[in-house]
Image: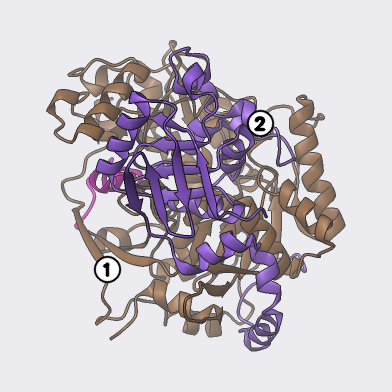
Amino acid sequence: MGKTLAEKIWAEHIVRAADGEPDLLYIDLHLIHEVTSPQAFDGLRLAGRTVRRPELTIATEDHNVPTLNIDKPIADPVSKLQVDTLRANCAEFGVRIHSLGDKDQGVVHVVGPQLGLTQPGMTIVCGDSHTSTHGAFGALAFGIGTSEVEHVLATQTLPLARPKTMAINVEGSLKTGVTSKDIILAIIAKIGTGGGQGYVIEYRGSAIRALSMESRMTVCNMSIEAGARAGLIAPDQTTFDYIKGKPHAPEDFDAAVKYWSTLYTDSDAQFDVEVNLNADDLEPFVTWGTNPGQGASLSSNVPNPADITDPEARGAAERALVYMGLEAGTPLKKIAIDTVFLGSCTNGRIEDLRAAAEVVKGKKIASTLRMLVVPGSARVRLEAEAEGLDKVFIDAGAEWRNAGCSMCLGMNPDQLAVGERSASTSNRNFEGRQGKGGRTHLVSPLVAAATALRGTLSSPADL
Amino acid sequence: MEKFIKHTGTAVPLRRSNVDTDQIIPAVYLKRVTRSGFEDGLFSAWRNDPQFVLNKAEYKAGTILVAGVDFGTGSSREHAVWALQNYGFKAVISSRFADIFRGNSLKGGLLTVIIEQSDVEALWAAIEANPATSVSVDLETRTVSYNNVVLPFAIDDYTRWRLMEGLDDIGLTFKNADSIDSFEKSRTTLKPATLPIRG
């Protein structure tokens, strides 16, 4: 029997396999940031260990950094200590770092691909659950905890139990105004936040193949919101073209393409589970609740928990509506928004900024809200500025910021106030995720832009 | 790491599903560079509510958390495990855990035990009827027991052995350093390196 793509990559990285033990897997690239690494470096020091392969390791500063006044010292002393600790650790252990002010500083999952360090067939880890983003290149990429960060630093390997495989087939073609963000939100709503638990997802089908690399990253990025540690897409010409010319693209590009072209699921391979989704039917999708599975088409209404048969899901929906301050039956398009956030490892790349800029160009955002535009990396910011996108957003009344995780998580100065409601292109609508008491609706960049103009959840078709 | 063989204590019923790691410990608490002191951030958004289960006197001494389905979803932050441990929890029982959280907990010696949802419901009812109910989590026999109830749970042999011996993964992997050396010798040169810096 043939192998799935995930199984092929797994098999190529087995350092040691023994009955009754997890496989020891080699890690090709380890991405590091300030939040989940300090205790790991401490562990190395305590045990007198070194970083085994600094040249397979790279660090940047993203979660805990401000997006304003980055030329000044970080104001919060606790945040500053954490960032300084990363810098000191990288200096001590010889790890490459891109700090605030550097053109390759940014959200760690934007930085790897833009440098060409994310390539097909690799194993990639990071102490961040959205590492699944890199799966868009046909890599096996997943988030790890700090103990595992220390393990990879010390050994360049990880002991891991073999995951099961799930195929999600998305056939058909997307209507205008429908994006890869809508695909993944619809998938999560369909299989639930636990649906992918224990699986590596492979996204397949004509609608996936038609996506650009950056749109594929958006899909893979949110695999973890469906419970799957990793999600990937077989590499193709779109992938190869994207990598070509990037700083760390292979020198022998033809040889690399030859190898990458072997990375697909064999026709006789069996997935443990298959899920199908029709792209033709999809509409812009938004969340109404407090987990990413609580979503619906933008044209529908806030659901009535009483209509939900599963008692757990019903209880969760009841609690979510209370937290979100929503009434069942309210049209989603009537929900007024206070803050629009465009950015994050989900939707902070140049294509996302271009798509949103196209919508707001020459118009003004509603006077009732603020809009934050946060490029995923300094390089994305520079590219956008070269295209004049910064002016488009500023002229529309939005704030143009420096790169970082920003409002995706309530850790740096960019946060929602208690009761404030956002339309956010990020990945999590958990209670308090964007700041204590903040209320989040997850949306695509197109919906974010249209919402900014109208003041209520909207798609460009509503303009 | 401390050995885990058997733990007996009282339990805390957390009747909520989909408790994500942002609820277990919000991001604002993740700025510290140590592994300790995270107990103040545990479930912090709910701790102001006097009716929240951890604020009730009868559950103050609890060392086993009994949670709803899909506990620990979301972020990979191991701080969630540290917060639970720093607070005093030795084990968490649920009918389903998120993968990364479960991996982190078992690396760090916080035993995560999976039982059927109907058994979780029965355990909640028993604890609420008598918060002083003694609950045992026994890794040796792979059982949870309370009153006259004995519930078997599954855990793979390797993880069980590692927890019962109190072994850390890095030490175990170093015993196979030869395998890593030989893997690296045969590794393809097509893979990228971060150093030297290009472009």
Q: Which residue is drawn at 56% across and 39% down?
A: B80
Percent from the top left, x then y, of residue B194? Answer: 71, 66
* Chain B tint in image: purple
Residue A431 among those drawn in magenta: no
Badge 2 density bin: few <14, some 14–19, many ≥20, Cα 10 Å: many
Lateral position of residue A178 relative to residue A412, left or right: left
Q: Is mark 2 on a helix, strand or loop?
A: loop
Percent from the top left, x then y, of residue A309? Answer: 14, 34
Q: Can residue A40 be seen in this view?
A: yes
| Quarter assignment of residue B185 | bottom right
The residues bearing labels 1 and 2 have C-alpha atoms spaced at a distance of 43 Å
| Quarter assignment of residue A454 | top left
Q: What element carries label 1?
A: loop
Q: Any idea which chain is the brown one in this picture?
A: A
Which chain is mark 1 on?
A
Residue denoted by label 2: A67
| The residue positioned farthest toward the front in the image shown | B148
Front-most of residues B23 and A61? B23
Q: Residue at x 42, y 66 (%)?
A: A238
Against A455, residue A114 (above or below) is: below
The region drawn magenta spans A170-192
Residue denoted by label 1: A272
Q: What residue type is labelled 2?
A: Thr
